Image: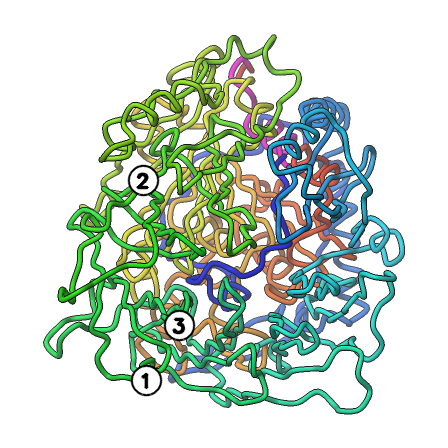
């Protein structure tokens, strides 16, 4: 289990606040009924499922009227609703009673694979070394630091870390103490002040994501008076370390206003700096890497090709001088700024000429002096090559880091700074002698480390793949070499899974210094090896032809020892929303399925991340493409013999739950079982109610039902509104959280109630609803509680689908 640092000094430049709106998606028509009930092969509880009350309620839109007898569940405070959820929890417990021993076995397997010590290696920032670890027997991390003396140096620090030698440790934040006090903990954002004397962080103790701002004085450990503010989302410090900027949300959880507070001062109230009055826009703030400027970003959606973006800058050395707007707000144009010694570097898709079309969504890098930021013509331009697109950037004293998509695969490269244009105004990236960081494979997932220190020539990343445990790598951009700092250890695996190969073979012709460091780089590659389990598990990516001829990437993972062609059970995962790439990083819990012969597959359907138009072609009026893609991937797994035709399961989280729910409605015979985690299932009714949190923001993703064509599109795939009557549906585990502010707890409850009401009465007895009555959208979050939840999920799948050697 990898620990991701919560100390990140700034988020990814292209990570919008609107990630807070993460919900769901999909599509559906009618389909033929199954000829047999799917629950005939496993025991059902003797008790009947709960039957909630029905109350007449009419909904009308665009001359259509329909009944929603479970609309009353929208009132989560209704005692009848709470009682119904408790009844459903009891029924789920009865349904899963015969899996108790299996859950214990699975839980022990997962816990035994966790490393004895879960920690991050220290990362230098100024004169301090910051790190996190999870104390033995505890659920949550502890954020710590210790002073780095001049005599120690980073090399000695890493050696001491490897030996377990730590100096004087200062605990900055202990999640476990907060959880023990309140019963729930979710830390949203952490920002250490430039002088390292204060820690500002946002805290949710209920699960409703109404984060409370707190500022801790690190010299004495006390919370600063008057620092606590509700509804805070993002934070940024001014350079004097006394003025803290923050954003707050409105009643619909839309971050809309920027204020600043003077830490430790009782003389002035918090001062508003910027307010976004347009209810379709969210506001985010961040600091440039060198801390010289604070950017205020107002944008209309998550990964928008068509959204609208506005950026202001604040001089962090003179924060009270006000905001300076970068450019006029133009539909489809976005800007992401960094600063380097009086020069702004701007990642943008603004047209380079009046005739240029924005539809390709491609970004380039512009350069201008600080005083020329409002100029209508940024002359100095850095362009990607033909087989490359720019995705994001980071900046340091001597280097620019670019996140790129190269030949359809993610990559990283660094360029030396400053960049000299001389008389040439346009340069291609190849002209700048880029160093492409060596990576293990094209399937590698890349997550940046904290990388706080502007002066550091070393860039830290966490690399992972479905068959490679997370490895922390430091890339020295000055010397163009890399070093493996730490790789996640996985216990109790070698005996059951065979030998572990040393590493992926590196494509050294592709990932080497193209000029004078060839020998040194090749030697470095030979000395630095990352371990994977490709000798025990096969991971491959296939292209699946969807309904309209589009090729959809499908990643397939299975055990070389346990998998049996044509007989294996399988689990297909999808998301397909907000331009987010499906997470395929290493997870040791999956071994409990893989070693029992399961196939795990990940469908990168349209609507998710990929090339520049992948999101556009699976959102709004194109949302149905996501569902067709997912079904096509499921059919491929069966037709190609990866999974038995009666043993395919599906799983979707949040927006992925809508994807799976819609796919089940369209093709209920394809799946034997499904898990829908905090799913957005009542899409049409929710989007018709603009008073609900995040609804207006989701118009950009799913469409605005006030517009008839978009209403009809949403109604056509909304899972709650398209359950096929009398159909034999798969067994389903549906989870919800009572305090979920992103997806109302009633969505899952209404779906389960209506499924039992409309679908096959016998099959629907294997549809269970499990509600966390105390948590929020992200559940409990502790390392052991996550294992318990996964063991429950896997036990459900094994009961309803079976393992490879089960007689079916």
Q: Is residue 722 above or below residue 90?
A: below
The Cα–Cα distance between marks 3 and 2, rounded to whole angstroms, is 27 Å
Q: Nearer the viewer, mark 3 or mark 1?
A: 3
Mark 2, residue position: 436
Q: Is residue 41 above or below residue 453?
A: above
Judge whether residue 797 is colored magenta.
yes
Of pointers 3 and 2, the one earlier in the residue sequence: 3
Mark 1 surroundings within 10 Å by alpha-carbon count, few (fewer than 14), some (14 through 19), many (20 or more): some
**Image x and y of residue 287, in percent:** 53, 68
Q: Quadrant of residue 44?
A: top right
Circle 1: element type: loop
Of pointers 3 and 1, the one earlier in the residue sequence: 3
Which residue occupies the foreground of this view, 413 or 657? Answer: 413
Residue span colored magenta: 793-805
Q: Quadrant of residue 742?
A: bottom right
Q: Are marks 3 and 2 in contact (CB under 8 Å)?
A: no
Mark 3, residue position: 342
Circle 3: element type: loop
- Residue lying at 82% horizontally and 87% vertically, measured from the top left: 266
Mark 1, residue position: 374
Which residue occupies the foreground of this view, 43 or 259? Answer: 259
Judge whether residue 568 is colored magenta.
no
The Cα–Cα distance between marks 2 and 1, rounded to whole angstroms, is 33 Å
């Amino acid at each position: 289990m990898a620990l991701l640092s919560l100390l990140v000094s700034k988020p990814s430049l292209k990570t919008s606040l609107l990630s807070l709106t993460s919900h769901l998606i999909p599509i559906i028509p009618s389909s033929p009924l199954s000829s047999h009930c799917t629950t005939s092969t496993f025991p059902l509880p003797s008790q009947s499922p709960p039957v909630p009350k029905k109350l007449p309620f009419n909904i009308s839109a665009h001359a259509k009227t329909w009944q929603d007898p479970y609309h009353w569940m929208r009132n989560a405070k209704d005692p009848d609703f709470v009682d119904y959820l408790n009844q459903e929890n009891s029924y789920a417990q009865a349904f899963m009673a015969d899996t108790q021993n299996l859950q214990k076995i699975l839980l022990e397997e997962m816990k035994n694979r966790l490393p004895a010590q879960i920690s991050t290696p220290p990362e230098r920032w100024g004169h301090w070394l910051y790190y996190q670890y999870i104390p033995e027997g505890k659920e949550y991390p502890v954020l710590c630091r210790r002073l780095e003396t001049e005599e120690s140096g980073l090399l000695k620090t890493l050696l001491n870390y490897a030996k377990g030698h730590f100096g004087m440790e200062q605990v900055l934040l202990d999640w476990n103490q907060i959880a023990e006090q309140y019963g729930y903990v979710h830390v949203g954002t952490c920002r250490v002040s430039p002088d390292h004397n204060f820690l500002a962080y946002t805290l949710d103790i209920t699960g409703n994501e109404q984060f409370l701002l707190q500022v801790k004085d690190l010299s004495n450990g006390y919370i600063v008076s008057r620092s606590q503010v509700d509804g805070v989302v993002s934070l940024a410090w001014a350079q004097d370390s006394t003025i803290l900027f923050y954003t707050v949300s409105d009643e619909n959880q839309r971050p809309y206003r920027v204020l600043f507070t003077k830490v430790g001062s009782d003389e002035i109230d918090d001062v508003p700096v910027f307010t976004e009055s347009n209810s379709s826009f969210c506001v985010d703030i961040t600091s440039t890497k060198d801390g010289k400027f604070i950017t205020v970003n107002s944008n209309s959606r998550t990964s928008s090709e068509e959204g609208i973006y506005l950026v202001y800058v604040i001089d962090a050395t003179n924060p009270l001088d006000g905001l300076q707007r970068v450019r006029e707000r133009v539909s489809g144009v976005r800007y992401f700024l960094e600063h380097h010694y009086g020069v702004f570097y701007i990642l943008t898709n603004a047209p380079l000429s009046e005739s240029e079309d924005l539809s390709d969504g491609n970004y380039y890098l512009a350069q201008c002096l600080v005083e020329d930021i409002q100029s209508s013509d940024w002359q100095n331009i850095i362009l990607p090559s033909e087989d490359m697109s720019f995705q994001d950037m980071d900046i340091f004293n001597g280097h620019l880091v670019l996140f790129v998509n190269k030949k359809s695969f993610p990559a990283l490269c660094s360029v030396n700074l400053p960049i000299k244009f001389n008389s040439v105004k346009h340069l291609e990236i190849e002209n700048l002698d880029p160093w492409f960081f060596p990576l293990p494979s094209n399937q590698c997932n890349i997550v940046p480390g904290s990388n706080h220190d502007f002066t550091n020539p070393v860039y830290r990343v966490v690399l992972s793949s479905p068959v490679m445990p997370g490895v922390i790598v430091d890339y020295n951009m000055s010397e163009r070499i890399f070093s493996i700092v730490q790789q996640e250890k996985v216990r109790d695996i070698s005996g059951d899974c065979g030998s572990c190969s040393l590493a992926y073979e590196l494509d050294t012709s592709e990932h080497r210094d193209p000029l004078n460091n060839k020998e040194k780089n090749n030697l470095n590659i030979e000395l630095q090896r990352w371990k994977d389990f490709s000798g025990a598990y096969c991971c491959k990516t296939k292209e699946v032809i969807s309904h309209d001829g589009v090729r959809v990437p499908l990643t397939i993972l299975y055990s070389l020892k346990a998998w049996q062609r044509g007989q294996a059970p399988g689990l297909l995962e999808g998301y397909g929303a907000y331009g987010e790439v499906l997470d395929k990083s290493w997870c040791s819990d999956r071994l409990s399925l893989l070693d029992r012969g399961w196939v795990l597959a990940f469908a990168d359907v349209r609507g998710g991340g990929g090339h520049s138009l992948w999101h556009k072609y699976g959102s709004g009026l194109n949302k149905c493409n996501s569902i067709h893609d997912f079904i096509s991937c499921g059919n491929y797994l069966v037709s190609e013999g990866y999974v038995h035709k009666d043993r395919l399961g599906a799983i979707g989280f949040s927006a992925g739950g809508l994807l799976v729910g819609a796919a089940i409605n369209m093709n209920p015979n394809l799946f034997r079982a499904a898990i829908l985690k905090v799913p957005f299932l009542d899409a049409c009714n929710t989007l018709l109610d603009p008073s609900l949190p995040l609804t207006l923001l989701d118009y950009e993703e799913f469409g605005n039902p006030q517009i008839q064509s978009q209403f009809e599109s949403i109604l056509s795939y909304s899972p709650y509104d398209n359950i096929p009557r009398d159909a034999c549906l798969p067994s389903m585990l549906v989870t919800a959280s009572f305090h979920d502010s992103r997806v109302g707890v009633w969505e899952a409850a209404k779906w389960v109630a209506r499924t039992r009401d409309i679908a096959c009465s016998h099959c629907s007895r294997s549809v269970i609803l499990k509600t966390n009555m105390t948590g929020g959208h992200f559940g409990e979050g502790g390392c052991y509680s996550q294992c318990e939840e996964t063991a429950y999920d896997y036990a459900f799948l094994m009961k309803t689908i079976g393992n490879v050697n089960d007689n079916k």
